[in-house]
Structure formats: C-alpha cells, structure tokens
Image: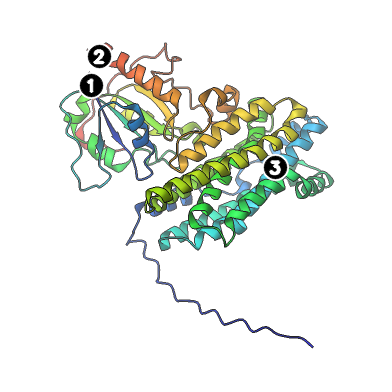
Amino acid sequence: MGSLIYFSSASGNTHRFIEKLGQPASRIPRNRSAEPPAPSTPFVLVLPTFSDGAGRGAVPGQVIRFLGDARVRSLLKGVIASGNRNFGSLFAHAGDVVSRKCGVPLLYRFELAGTDTDLVRVQHGMTEFWKRQS
Amino acid sequence: MTIHTQMPPRVLKVPRAINWNRLQDDKDLEIWNRLTVNFWLPEKVPLSNDIQSWAALREDEQQLTIRVFTGLTLLDTIQNAIGAPALMADALTPHEEAVLTNIAFMEAVHARSYSSVFSTLCRTADVDDAFRWSEENEHLQAKSRLILNEYGAASSPLKKKIASVFLESFLFYSGFYLPMHWSSRARLTNTADLIRLIIRDEAVHGYYIGYKFQRMAETLSEAGREEIKAFAFSLMFDLYEIEARYTESLYDGVGLTEDVKHFLHYNANKALMNLGYEALFPDSVCQVNPAIMAALSPNADENHDFFSGSGSSYVIGKAVATEDEDWDF
C-alpha cells in the first residue's frame, strides 16, 4: 500500500482533512527553504487550490518544487485536490493541472477541510486504489 | 445659550509607511494578489441580455427576486461601510489593513451591482417598494442587528471576525440561491454570471478573515479558545434561526424552502470551516439540489473524479513524457 503526501497552507484546511482521514501522510513544508519529503514508494498527492479567476497559480510553489524532481514524479500515482465550489469551473483546479501535467488520475475533489462523506469516500477509495495498483 | 462641550483633541499617530517587500504574513500578499487580479465591475456583464428573460417571470417571481437582491444589498452595504472598516482597526499588519480596504471597496461594488440589475430589468416603483420592504422586514433587520452588535466597539477582535465570516460565508446564501435556481432553468443567466463573480469574491473574503481569526485565536489559552468557539457556534445557531424564518417568508410561496435550507446548512458548514471549526450540520441535511451545485460551478463536474462513483467511464490519461526543464506550471 502506498502513502499520502500533502501540502497545506497556513489556513490548515488540508491538514485538518488529513488528520481526520487518519492514514499515514507526510507534509510538504510551507517553509520554502525546508527539505520536502523524499518518497521511495508510490504515493498519492493531496493539495489545495490557489488559482485566480483565470486559473493561474493553482498549484502552490512548494508543490511545484516537490514535483520538479523527476524521480518523485515517477512515484506519483494519483492526485486529490481541495478547493471551493464558489470558484465555479475552477473548483479544485490544482487537481486538473497536476493530473494533466503528470498523466495521473484525479482521484477526488473536496471543499475546504472536507465533510464526513468526503472522508468515507477517500478512505474507501484509497484502499481500493492501492489494491488495483499492486 | 449654546454649550460647547470640548472634546479632548485626538492625536493621530503617524503610521509607518507600508513596505510590501517586508511581510510579516505571506497570506497578506497572496490574498492581495488574488483580490486585485479578480477585480471586476458590473459593467462587464451584459445584463441587458436578460430583459426578455425577466419579462417571462411571473409577477410574484419578479417581486421575490427584487426582494432577495435588496436583502443582499443591505448585507453588502453593512460589510462595506461598517464590517470591513471595523476589522481594519484590529489589523495586526499594515498589509492586512490594505487587504481590508480592497475587501471594503469590493463590497461597495457588489452593492452597486444589484442596482445595475434593477436599473436594467426592473420598474423603479417595484424597486422602491422592495427597498421599503427591506427596511421593514423583521428577519432581515434581526440578522443585521445581530451582526452589528458584534461589529460595535464593545466587541472583541475575534468576535468581529466571526461575525464577518458568518455574514460573508453564510448569510448571503439564502439570497444567492435564487439566481442559481433561475440559472439552472436557463433564466436570468447573465445576472447569474454577475452573482457568480460576487460569490467568488465572498469565498476569498471568508477564507482570509477566517484565516486571520485562526491566527489570533491560536494565541489564546485553552480556556479562551473554548470560550470563543462556544460563542461562534452560539452565534451561528442564532443566525440560523433567523435565516430559517427569512427563508420560509421568502420561498414558501414558490415551494423552494426545503431546498434552500439544505443550501444554508451546506454553507453554514463552510463558514465554520473557514474559522477552522468542524461542521455543525450532518451531511444528510446538506444534500444540495445537484442543479444548484451545477449552477454554482458550471463545468466543474465534467471531468469525473475516480472515487465519486460517477466515473465508471473514466480512462486513465496517457502519461505525456515530461522533461525536467518544461516542468513549469
């Protein structure tokens, strides 16, 4: 079974989602000078969206830097993105960008810190997903 | 004889010039950039394309729409003239203060937008009636009163932020529901485009002020944090009670009340999440009509995701070889 790697900004929504999920996960640091995690096994990325009204800047810089490493990218198996439906068609846009760029499936999208339904779906979905991967 | 009471002269301190290259909080610049890039004016939306659509509404539907927009105008007016300025006094950084001036101005743009809708689509007499209605409507006045109590000088910086997040992330939605409903039926679609711009702004405002709330609440003792959380949930209960009555008074006639309430619960939970809190309403009462969700985020669900169950037709995208040097978003 693979792991989760996530980014959460200072507002902490994604961090709260990961805490409630209760699965092992490592965090990409907010501090740009800190070393990001160095995965050695397949993982799924969980990240929030920060795009403007035109979709620019959706993926946080720290995540771009993390995925800039080709070896890290080769272990990325899927992406889960959060956002806010108030942003219309750009809801959870970071997930679309990473999915397209890295050729990995967009597994799930949720709003802010997620609901109970989101948690159940992701818990169940991740278990099934890793089964299929192995 | 006139007696002049002499007020002691208030000496204004010279502030330090704001330096955007020395940030205490990165969020300030992030949100400043977001808000300024997203800036818009109602003139950019071709509202006159809705004239025929407006004429096709029944008279009671027109009256409901004007009333809903008048209610929204009142909340935007409060936020522009009182809410955002009240938060400015508590700003911890000069950059936060500057962001709040942007928020205050955009609230004036929102309030102004409803008048653009009115002048394009409605008869002046009907609009005047609705403004009178808003001054006399007990629910609208009651929720404004609850929010204003927290914006007053006697309140605390944390309570002001809670009230502000509840106004921007919760109270607007009994109103926003209606243009999304019309849009889902291909009515007033240009007006809905304008409302979606407002909805997008409110998400950033609620997120930012909620974030500032969390930073400030972190500095409290455990007991202090418990106390402020209890206050937040209690204010939410009080506002919800009023919102439920307001919703019934507006939407019973068109049979939409239950649907609107699901939308209220869903947004109340999002408002609480902006403050860093858990949801209040269980998912079972947050089942928003899919047509409303689709109107809120058009095209967002065209790409099915893997876990939602709707993605049986999902095909894993073929990996495109990415060179390290073109790894640039």
Which residue is identified by label 3? B69
- Labels 1 and 2: the sequence-earlier one: 1
Type of the residue with mark 2? Gln
- Of B249 and B237, nearer the camera is B237
Task: Evaluate if marks 1 and 2 touch, with contact meaning CB atoms under 8 Å apart.
Answer: yes
Type of the residue with mark 3? Phe
Type of the residue with mark 1? Gly
Chain containing mark 2? A
- Of B212 and A34, nearer the camera is B212
For image coordinates 34% across by 38% down, the residue present is: A59
Left or right for B7, reference B233: right
Q: In x, y percent, where is residue B80? A: 60, 55
Which residue is identified by label 1? A2
Give the SS element for disc 2.
helix
Disc 1 packing (10 Å; few <14; some 14–19; many ≥20): many
Q: Quadrant of the N terminus of chain A?
A: top left
For image coordinates 27% across by 38% down, the residue present is: A64
In the displayed image of the protein, which residue is found farthest to the right?
B125
